[in-house]
Image (cartoon, rainbow, N blue to C red):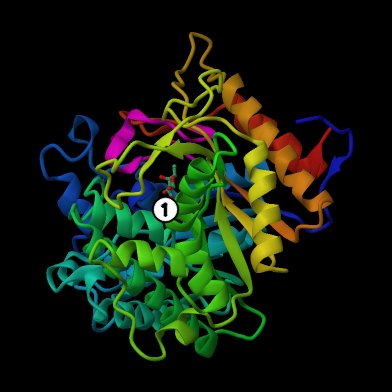
Amino acid sequence: MSRTDDTVFPDGFLWGAATASYQVEGAVSADGRGPSIWDTFSHTPGTTVHGDNGDIACDQYNRIADDVALMSELGVRSYRFSIAWPRIQPDGSGPALEAGLDYYRRLVALLRDASIEPAVTLYHWDLPQALQDAGGWEIRDTAERLADLAVIVAGALGDEVGTWITMNEPWVSSFMGYGTGEHAPGLHGLDAALRASHHLLLGHGRASEALRAALPSSAEVGITLNLSPVQAVTTEPQDVAAARRVDGFLNRWFLDPICRGAYPPDLLAHYAALDAGPPVEDGDLETVSAPIDFLGVNYYSARTVGASDGTDGSLASLGVVDRVPPSTKRTAMGWPIVPTGLTELLVRVTTDYGPLPLYVTENGAAFDDYVDPNGEVRDPERVEYLDAHVRAAHAAISDGVDLRGYFVWSFLDNFEWAEGYSKRFGIVYVDYPTQRRVPKQSARWYSTVIAANGLA
Ligand code: FCB
């Protein structure tokens, strides 16, 4: 992408950093917290790299004051964090545990004192195990339980928090949790994944209704999706059709119900041919498509695909193969680095589903960081990645996208789900044995970007 000198962002652009409860908090038995599906899953042999789990993670539960002080020192303007549902309702229903709410009240107060805007994600994957035992996201009732949680959390934090995200990445929760089994609860099956995806969407709709009823009218309510632009490797019709299927599978399956009140017909037909489909009841899609104040976009990479010969044996039998050019650089996750994809994606969402205020609620990269003999963590690849993506976000604004903010993933190295602690996404290094935080070169870089409201 061509570099322009003019990468100053609009006034009030929100520069943030993000984490999620199970990935950073630790303290899994503190103050009455119940088990979540991620506790159960990560303690099951063979599920995570090195058998890692979130028992201690970054111990943020006990170190929250220091972590907020570090954010403040770096100049971070907003902190996106999530609520650990089993701290609030250990069994996923019934009265709230005040100790759990108090933790988040304290976190919000610390942020406010430091002039850092809190952005709350209600659900970032740590479902109470008791709700999973009753059927988890495969059953409708779980959507109602999320709405109950929304009422409780809005009641506790509503006066102090202006930005509310009902849930993070329902695609990952449903397709990796209930489809491929790579994530908690580790179940397998296309129909299970589609049931979960529908009930997650319904949960988003029911939780946003509950939030709107409980919050001041100034509060903004939205949802965060993981989206990727999908390019066909050639202009041959079979490759173009393959790219369209992947786009439907990853992007439109969630964007269409939320923004248009209908599942994409081509995907419904594709799944019906496989004897699978979402369990839609009357009125569901009205609930799912109630207006949102913003859409949160998590962007890491883009796809380039072609048609495969015959069925590909994958969960959704999409009949595609990835055809990313071999010269494309990759992160430690193996994800191709495609900054232009972010511009393309933000413009596409705006064109096809907007106009709509957008936030990049996650963007970042894992690299193999280490503390050098001088005690420093130099991560030039991450600086390069973030610099290119911030420029790509700016290019989208120049193209007319109503982008309101950018959150780096992540503030800290943390428990990267099935990858355990083997993948470091932080702008701050965590030395897990001592829990010492070491701001990386990228953290210093980010501070200068925030201070300048853009790039020189
Ligand atoms: C996203 C998740 C986030 C983190 C990043 C790397 O899918 O929302 O929790 O794991 O990927």
Q: Residue furthest top?
A: 373
**Considering depth in this image, is 195 or 25 the residue closer to the camera?**
195
| Above or below, 244 relative to 351 | above
Query: Which residue is painted at 67% across and 55% down in the image?
Result: 348
Quarter of the image with the N terminus in it: top right
Mark 1 sits on what residue?
20
Considering the whole magenta stretch, tell me its main secondary structure. loop
Residue 106 appears anywhere in the view: no
Query: Which residue is painted at 48% across and 43% down in the image?
Result: 238
Q: Residue 24: percent from the left, percent from the top?
A: 38, 47
Q: Is residue 369 left or right of residue 277?
A: right
Q: Is 212 colored magenta in this rendering? A: no
Q: Residue 175: percent from the left, percent from the top?
A: 31, 55
Mark 1 C-beta to ligand 1 under 8 Å:
yes
Residue 285 appears anywhere in the view: yes
| Above or below, 450 relative to 334 | below
Magenta stretch in the rendered image: 410-428
| Above or below, 230 relative to 372 | below
Q: Residue furthest right?
A: 6
Q: Is residue 394 left or right of residue 80?
A: right
Q: Is residue 135 left or right of residue 219?
A: left
**Considering depth in this image, is 205 or 160 the residue closer to the camera?**
205
Total marks shown come to 1
User: Alpha-carbon neighbours of circle 1 within 10 Å: few (<14), some, or many (≥20)?
Assistant: many
Q: Residue furthest front?
A: 237
Q: Amino acid at mark 1?
A: Ala
Q: Residue 91: percent from the left, percent from the top?
A: 19, 73
Q: Residue 390: percent from the left, percent from the top?
A: 70, 40
**Element class at badge 1:** loop
Q: Is residue 255 left or right of residue 397?
A: left
Quarter of the image with the C terminus in it: top right
